[in-house]
Image (cartoon, grey):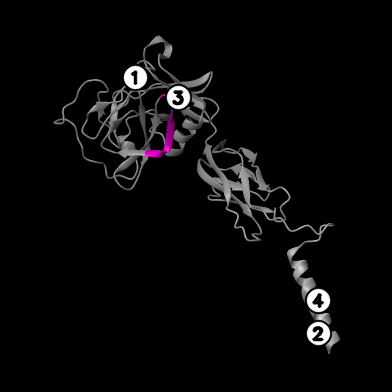
Amino acid sequence: MKKISYTLALLFTASIIFSSCRNNGDNEPVVYATHIIVDPNPIVLSVGETKILNATVVPQNAYNRALYWTSSNGSIVTVDNHGRITAHSTGTAHIIVNLIRQTGNIQVPQSGYTVFVSEGRTEPTQGGTIINGIEWATHNVDVPGAFTENPEDAGMFFQWNRRVGWSSSDPLTSIHWDSSVSASAAWLPINDPCPIDWRVPSPYELVILALASNTWVSNWNNTDVSGRIFGTAPNQIFLPAAGGRNTNGVLGTVGTDGWYWHSSATNMGFGWYLHFNSTNVLAGSEWSNRAGGFSVRCVAE
């Protein structure tokens, strides 16, 4: 009886030792993953384009290194088991990478990429400029249905989802300004101030523009007009820092900031826009009251 008890005790002790160590030839303790590193992103693709995404498990000698990939919207971007993505349609998708096996005492957080997909246009159809697969107008909207005469001209300001143009330089009185807010969830085609065959850009299109190479200039082409150049030569456009009008019609930030509407709204009376100044370019996270007056830069249909 004592011999049996002694044998069971030895087996129990051995099982404890085996569970805390994995025999890789030298009985070293098991090393578990702590986090996943991905490359800088977002990423811009054109429809039909593919790309292999990178993901590095840390530490490199971790036991649980196998990964799985998922897409938030497979109709826009799909991903295979090796991180290879394929763009299918325009829009935005999030690619998530995580460990197949979460083991040890550390819960490894998921990581991933944000992917913006453009239509992949390579040649202009309306005389605009192609930047990241999207054709952009080279001038701001002036009176509804027409562009400005020169690329540096501010044009007119528009309240979100309205086709009425307001001066970008002349003082306005509160008597003439309409401070009400459009209740629409999107900029309606009937209210679009862009010329025929052009339209107000979508949210992802302005984000794609913001992700393009861009530079602030304080005297564009010796015109004394400040703003930002977007794109890479020769495919570049200049957006003047025309400023804007607040919800009471008061003009401000002329020469220091550019505010450009896009076609989507939030759910609380706000609209999304692209904003830039001499140090920053922001799109996709910026919104303002729809009663304010901002510039419009169109994209080709």
Tag 2: residue type? Ser
Closer to viewer: mark 2 or mark 1: 2
Tag 3: residue type? Gln
The picture quadrant where one finds residue 242 is top left
Alpha-carbon span between mark 2 and mark 4: 10 Å
Whether tag 2 and tag 3 are in contact, CB under 8 A, the answer is no
Residue, disc 3: 126
Considering the numbered disc 3 on the image, is that residue within a helix, a strand or a loop?
loop
Tag 4: residue type? Leu
Residue, disc 4: 11
The picture quadrant where one finds residue 37 is top right
Closer to viewer: mark 3 or mark 4: 4
Residue, disc 2: 5
Closer to viewer: mark 4 or mark 1: 4
Is residue 261 rendered to the left or right of residue 179?
A: right
Is residue 36 rendered to the left or right of residue 124?
A: right
What is the count of numbered marks?
A: 4
Q: From the top left corner, tell me how far across and down residue 42 is, in percent.
A: 54, 38
Residue, disc 1: 148
Q: From the top left corner, tell me how far across and down residue 186 is, in percent.
A: 35, 42
Looking at the rendering, the stretch of residues picked out in magenta corresponds to 278-286
